[in-house]
Amino acid sequence: MEAWEPKKSKDIFYVLLKDAILKEDCPICFLLNKGKERWIDNLLYEHVTDPNTREKIRNDGFCRRHLWDIFSYSNNHPGLDGLGISIIMQDVLESQIGKLIRAENDDKFWGDKCILCKLIAESEENYLASLISWLEAELLEVYKASPSILCLNHFRSVSGKIKYEHKELLLKIQLDKLEELNRNLKSFISKSAWDANESPTFKEASAKELAGKVLRGGVY
């Protein structure tokens, strides 16, 4: 199976991160979610009938969440005829039947070696390391001026590893972004009242979605 992984070149990392920082999202979460979608797309369109891919699916499988993600992706893309997801489901189901027959432990029944979980964890580690490096080099000011906000989980990861001389500035930037987001939420709530004189702006109306991304974090 052709795995998706970030490139090792810092130049390419820089381009990916700089583009992600310009999105109204956590840049790490944005890259992980785009990567997950690309990997699922490649699996269903190009690799699902590959013998090596099918063997890996039978041996390692998927966790319940990622199996459902693949199923949902297949259902939501008209170009897929259902054959690919049927092959995957049959391979996983046959594997689970075998586990039942062998009476394997329940705690390892569902994808304890989930293919996607492993790829996402490796990619997250690489993206975080690169973001820390580039923030210290030059992306901190880009982040400050951008609409993106590191989710709380990734902010803690970055803040815990960034050099001391940049930590205070990163914290100030993060707090400024979170406080602006909080003001937009409050304004949307206020302007949604029946007796309000103003309608919410687009930024205020979309604040709830961004707040959800910041609070939840991770791969959606």
Image: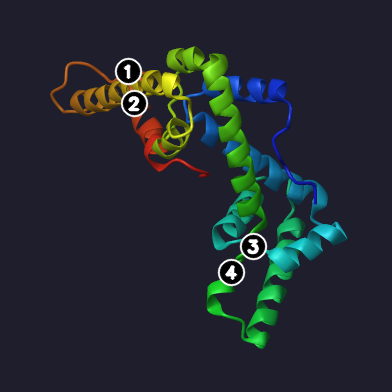
Along the line of sight, which residue is nearer the eye, 45 or 125?
A: 125
Residue at x-position 62% and y-position 86%: 103
Return the disc, 4 or 2, that comes first in the chain's sequence.
4
Question: Residue 201 has which mark?
Answer: 1
Please give left or right for residue 89 compared with residue 187 in the image: right
Q: In this view, does 49 lie to the left or right of 101?
A: right
The answer to whether marks 1 and 2 mark residues whose Cβ atoms lie closer than 8 Å is yes
Give 37 or 127, whichever is nearer the viewer: 127
- The correct choice, above or below, for 100 with respect to 87 in the image is below
Nearer the N terminus, badge 4 or badge 1?
A: 4
Mark 1 closeness class: few <14, some 14–19, many ≥20 residues within 10 Å: few
**Where, by quadrant of the figure, is residue 145 drawn?**
top left
> Are discs 1 and 3 less than 8 Å apart at CB?
no
Q: What x and y, as percent, mark residue 29?
A: 52, 36
The Cα–Cα distance between marks 4 and 3, rounded to whole angstroms, is 9 Å
**In the figure, is residue 154 to the left or right of 13?**
left
Q: Measure the C-alpha gap from mark 1 to mark 2.
A: 6 Å
Q: Which mark is residue 110?
A: 4
